[in-house]
Amino acid sequence: MYLAFFDFDSTLIEQEIIDELAALKGRKEEIAAITRETMEGKHKFSETIHLKTEVLEGLTLRDLENVASTITFRQNFGPLMRWLKEKEFKTAVITGSFDNMLSLLPQTSGFDFIYANSLEVIDGSLTGKCVPRVADNKGAIAESLKKKLGIPTERCVAVGDGSTDIPVFMQSSLSIALNAKPIVRDAASVALDTNNLEDLIPPLEAWLCNRG
C-alpha cells in the first residue's frame, strides 16, 4: 500500500477557492494578492486565513453553490485517480481550503481522506469566521496519517504548489511541485508545469519502479 498527499487549490483545481468567493464581495484582487504572497512563503498561513475569511461575511450557502459550479479540475483528474487506485494508493487531500466547498464537488468523493478548514455558517450565511483545522500544520497532519495507516515515508508521495506544502514534501519519499512557486520547486523532487494531471504518472511510475 502507498499513500499520496495532495494540495487542492491551484493543484488539483485551477482556482483558489477563497479568491473566487472574495470576488462575490468585489475583493478578489486584494485577497488573491494575500494568497499569492502566502504561497510564496512571505506570510504564515495562520496569519492570513482569518483576515481573508472575514471578507466573506454575509455570503450565503447558495453563493457557495454558485461558486462551486464554476470550479474546474485540471485535465485528466479522473484518469490520475484511477491510476492511483490501480496501484494501491490511499489518497489524502490536505488543504487550507474549506470543507464547505469541497463537499459540493462530486470529484472529491474519491479521496480516502480530506483535511480542510471550515467556514462558520449560522442561519444559512457565513459569519466571516473560520475553524482552522489546517493552517501551518500540514506536515503534522501528514505524519499523523502515515502513523495511523502504518505507511512509512518511503511509500509516500506528495503533490503541491505552495510553501505550506513543503512540510508535507518532507514527510514523503517523492515530492512533485506542480505549477509551483520557486521556493516550492526548490524543495521538491520533481517540478512540473502542466494543466494535465496525467503528466504526474511518469514520475510516479519511475518512483514505483525504484521501490523494487
Image (cartoon, rainbow, N blue to C red):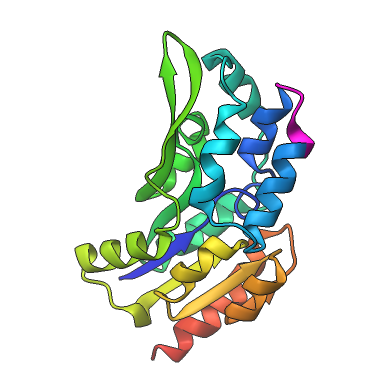
Quadrant (top left, top right, bottom left, bottom right) of the C terminus? bottom left
Instruction: Return the residue nearer the eye: 100 or 28.
Output: 28
Residue at coordinates 36% horizontally, 66% vertically from top-left? 88
Q: Main secondary structure of the magenta part?
A: loop
Residue 174 appears left or right of 193: left
Residue 134 appears left or right of 159: left
Residue at coordinates 66% horizontally, 35% vertically from top-left? 71
Instruction: Return the residue nearer the eye: 148 or 56.
Output: 56
Residue at coordinates 66% horizontally, 73% vertically from top-left? 183
* Image spot of residue 154 (x, y percent): 36, 82
* Image spot of residue 61 (x, y percent): 52, 16
Residue at coordinates 48% horizontally, 19% vertically from top-left? 127
Residue 34 position (above or below residue 185): above
Residue 151 position (above or below residue 26): below
Residue 126 position (above or below residue 211): above
> Could one spot residue 74 in this view of the protein?
no
- What's the magenta region? 25-29
Quadrant (top left, top right, bottom left, bottom right) of the N terminus? bottom left
Tell me the quarter of the picture where residue 60 sits: top right
Residue 123 appears left or right of 204: left
Instruction: Return the residue nearer the eye: 64 or 77.
Output: 64
